[in-house]
Image (cartoon, helix red, strand yellow):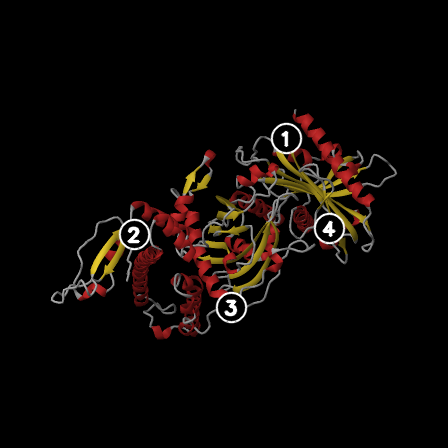
Amino acid sequence: MFHANMFEGHHMFDMAPKSSENDSSKLKDDDYETKSGTETMEAQSGDDRDPSEQHPKKKRYHRHTQRQIQDMEAFFKECPHPDDKQRKELSRELGLEPLQVKFWFQNKRTQMKAQHERSENSILKAENERLRAENNRYKEALRNASCPNCGGPAALGEMSFDEQHLRIENVRLREEIDRISGIAAKYVGKPLSSLSNLSPHLPSRSLDLGVSNFGAQSGFVGEMFGATDLLRSVTGPTEEDKSMIVEIAVAAMEELMRMAQAGEPLWIQGENNTEMLNEEEYLRTFTRGIGPKPLGMRSEASRESAVVIMNHVNLVEILMDANQWSTIFCGIVSRAMTLEVLSTGVAGNYNGALQVMTAEFQLPSPIVPTRENYFVRYCKQHTDGTWAVVDVSLDSLRPSLLSKCRRRPSGCLIQELPNGYSKVVWVEHIEVDDRSVQNIYRPLVNSGLAFGAKRWVGTLDRQCERLASSMAINIPTGDLCVITTAEGRKSMLKLAERMVMSFCTGVGASTAHAWTTLSATGSDDVRVMTRKSMDDPGRPPGIVLSAATSFWIPVQSKRMFDFLRDENHRSEWDILSNGGEVQEMAHIANGRDPGNCVSLLRVNSANSSQSNMLILQESCTDSTGSYVIYAPVDISAMNIVLSGGDPDYVALLPSGFAILPDGPGYGSPGILDVGSGGSLLTVAFQILVDSVPTAKLSLGSVATVNSLIKCTVERIKAAVICDNA
């Protein structure tokens, strides 16, 4: 009979057998930390045993080799709970019995748990001391309290009813906060059955994470055109999953805080002051998590910080509302939906809020696959006042999902600043199978700029400036083109926001879109898509044909952006302007960069028999990308908007350009980074081909839009490449 005890360590141990009654007792903690081997107990047979002798069972120790220990340690980091097949394979490689491998992993897990409990005990002791000191301060303050009316010493009985009620309410709210943000952390590592026994000890008015269901909150951005795989197949969590989700969320919050605040060796300096995650150190530091990286996936990890013009309360609200989050980050989030709210938070804010979501992340190009995620989002206010919002994938709860992307703990820390601004530290940690990305976008995607923290922070900073400009007052009146009335500015910015969101959600490779390639000659093929517009006051009724193409152009991103947004160059590429003079009629600056603005342009037709045309245009840029988006607008409708009228009834079909750097180059601060000195340009048009929604799309319409987009591309190349040379 074998009884194996294998403990990690490198010290020698006593080889002598023990004859006391303690032979069958459990080993002490020191044994867990020092022994590394297999202990085998053997008894002599009846034939060999001398009846006059009473020898105890003899113990024989098999010490593991250094290589065996190292290999099992490395495997433990990836998978602390190997199954039978993995144990057999590991034992065959190391020359051990499967039972020896099994006991080694059992004892290693026990050792790690003991270390974790000792560490947790130290933290709890320190917290207890802090609370004791705080309690003593409160007692001292009560002894020295004075009556607000007479100035004499105050007795506790003199406390007003309202004050007593507020104190009781404050205690209740503290208990709710502690439950939401701390209960799961306290029970991390315990079996789920232990969580079900907590409810009798909780306050009667506490939020019930296992029961509360506030229904699915839809936060779709854009429209659903066709079948999707992940986002439509996922449903809300089951009752059995909810306790596990709480545990996963709290562990993710702990990891995010450490990832956002740690320095070396977890984050190491790369080229040009960029930060890179040390993968080996990450695996050593975070033993818990969502499991090892799946086969075929590549890791992306990045961290970025910035000070943004928005207070922490509004930032948290945006991140916790799927509609607002999708609107602010419409260039990154093509669709998002809240499947179920497990907790709405306490004390009238989002502290402790917990919700299960799905989202689709994109680049503004129809040839770059989107990334779909099923995740939980958890918000918490920490003791120092810092807010944190973390996402982590829940793929482990849905093994049937064939996801090509998953989010390790990712999100942001938000610190309130005295001037009303906020300091944001953003962490993105993704594992993705992106082997289907086309070659011209691969350097950008592999660098982490396409979906990394820098893009999220750059977009947030630009959008915060935009929101601040919409609320600006005392606009200087020196420029005749500047809109000075607050109502007119807000209406025009709201209309431009809808135009930008419609363009961004319609230009990507979302699984909600059904793009058709017109030819198959290369990456710059034109892709088309049709949809029917009915009963939507924001779009003209009929059949809308969308066309888009992406290609590389040997012109720097900033140069490309400045050329396309300049009305003086518009006639060089805009076929629809028919060579007419373009004049800016109204202008709203919405950021520190002069390229961030909303303009109303008038095209003065060269042909006197044709009426003049108005174009609404928004141009925006940050360190990771730029957009120039425009749409023809009706003159009478724009007069209403400029007077402060409702912009929701203005029909728009936006077209435009998305400009990205072609790789991870490093330019000057505030200037678009470039790779080899070129740009990745996406050109997209939307055209109403028939005002009757029930009409069929003709091949002539497709040929027309194909010619239009290719002619525009040729004009742009001819203008900017020659000028750049």
Q: What distance separates the C-alpha of mark 2 from that of mark 4?
A: 73 Å
Callout 1 environment at 10 Å: few (<14), some (14 to 19), or many (20+)?
many
Counting from the top left corner in percent of width and height, residue 322 is at: 58, 57
Q: Secondary structure at mark 3?
A: helix
Q: Find disc 2 in the rendering and name its residue.
A: 8
Residues 489 and 157: in front is 489
Q: Find disc 3 in the rendering and name its residue.
A: 239
Callout 3 environment at 10 Å: few (<14), some (14 to 19), or many (20+)?
few
Quadrant for the N terminus in the image: bottom left
Q: Earlier in the sequence, mark 2 or mark 4?
A: 2
Q: Earlier in the sequence, mark 3 or mark 4?
A: 3
Residue at 33% x, 46% y: name it. Answer: 70
Tell us which disc is closer to us: 3 or 1.
3
Q: 51 left or right of 153?
A: left
Residues 658 and 559: in front is 658
Q: Secondary structure at mark 1?
A: loop
Q: What distance separates the C-alpha of mark 3 from that of mark 1?
A: 55 Å
Tell us which disc is closer to us: 4 or 1.
1
Quadrant for the C terminus in the image: top right
Q: Is residue 105 visible?
A: yes
Q: Secondary structure at mark 4?
A: helix
Residues 645 and 367: in front is 367
Counting from the top left corner in percent of width and height, residue 300 is at: 50, 44
Q: Are marks 2 and 3 in contact (CB under 8 Å)?
A: no
Q: What distance separates the C-alpha of mark 3 from that of mark 4?
A: 49 Å
Tell us which disc is closer to us: 2 or 4.
2
Q: 64 left or right of 508?
A: left
Q: 364 left or right of 310?
A: right
Q: Find disc 1 in the rendering and name its residue.
A: 555
Q: Are marks 2 and 4 in contact (CB under 8 Å)?
A: no
